[in-house]
Amino acid sequence: MNQPASAWAAARSRGREAALQMLYQGEIGKLTPPLVRTIFWQVQEDPGEPVRAFAERLAEGVTGALERLDPLIEAHSANWRLSRMAVLDRLVLRLAVYEFLHEPETPRPVVIDEAVELAKRYSTPDAGRFVNGVLDAIRRDLEQETPPTS
């Protein structure tokens, strides 16, 4: 991390947003991750290597980890099956849970805040509260399994 913290955080936020858009494109279009990546970057302005690399790592990571992510989300989504969730809510949750599990340098509260903002921006007015509740429950359980290092 050779750039100032605020620039680093902004790049990661843009990367999360791009990853969500790629996941949505793949989900709706039933496209493979390599095809999504190719199409996505053809129509998007190049955000620079750090943003692009982070977005691709997240999107491909989520796609490859559904067997681990989806049961966690369903177990913490009281009375909600994944198939009944709004597509964007489901994708935001997958993205955040993937980051909980595979991007340990980002504090979990930051991941939750970013996910809530994505949900508010791209989903329904109530999506932020729903995403926050599910992610907070998952965070608590994960921290009981392996307490965070500080």
Image (cartoon, grey):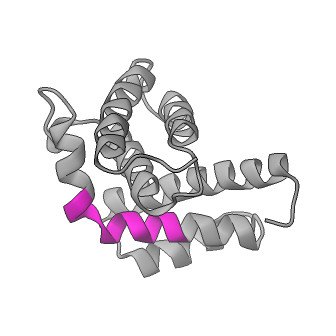
Is residue 45 toward the left or the right of residue 68 in the image? right
Where does the N terminus fall, quadrant-wise?
A: bottom right
Tell me how many marks there are.
0
Is residue 6 toward the left or the right of residue 30 in the image? right
**Above or below for 91 versus 136:** below
**Above or below for 16 versus 83:** below
Q: Main secondary structure of the magenta part?
A: helix
Return the x and y of residue 25 as percentages of the image width and height: 43, 59
Q: Quadrant of residue 49?
A: bottom right
Return the x and y of residue 37 as percentages of the image width and height: 52, 74
Return the x and y of residue 133 as percentages of the image width and height: 35, 25
Q: Quadrant of residue 73?
A: top left
Residue at position x 21%, y 32% in the image: 77
The foreground one among 6 and 143 is 143
Return the x and y of residue 124 as percentages of the image width and height: 41, 24
Is residue 147 toward the left or the right of residue 51 in the image? left
Residue at position x 46%, y 55% in the image: 99
- Magenta residues span 57-68
Q: Quadrant of residue 31?
A: bottom left
Residue at position x 17%, y 41% in the image: 74
The foreground one among 147 and 117 is 147
Is residue 66 part of the magenta span, yes or no? Answer: yes
The foreground one among 135 and 105 is 105
Is residue 108 part of the magenta span, yes or no? Answer: no
Residue at position x 87%, y 61% in the image: 3
Is residue 82 toward the left or the right of residue 58 in the image? left
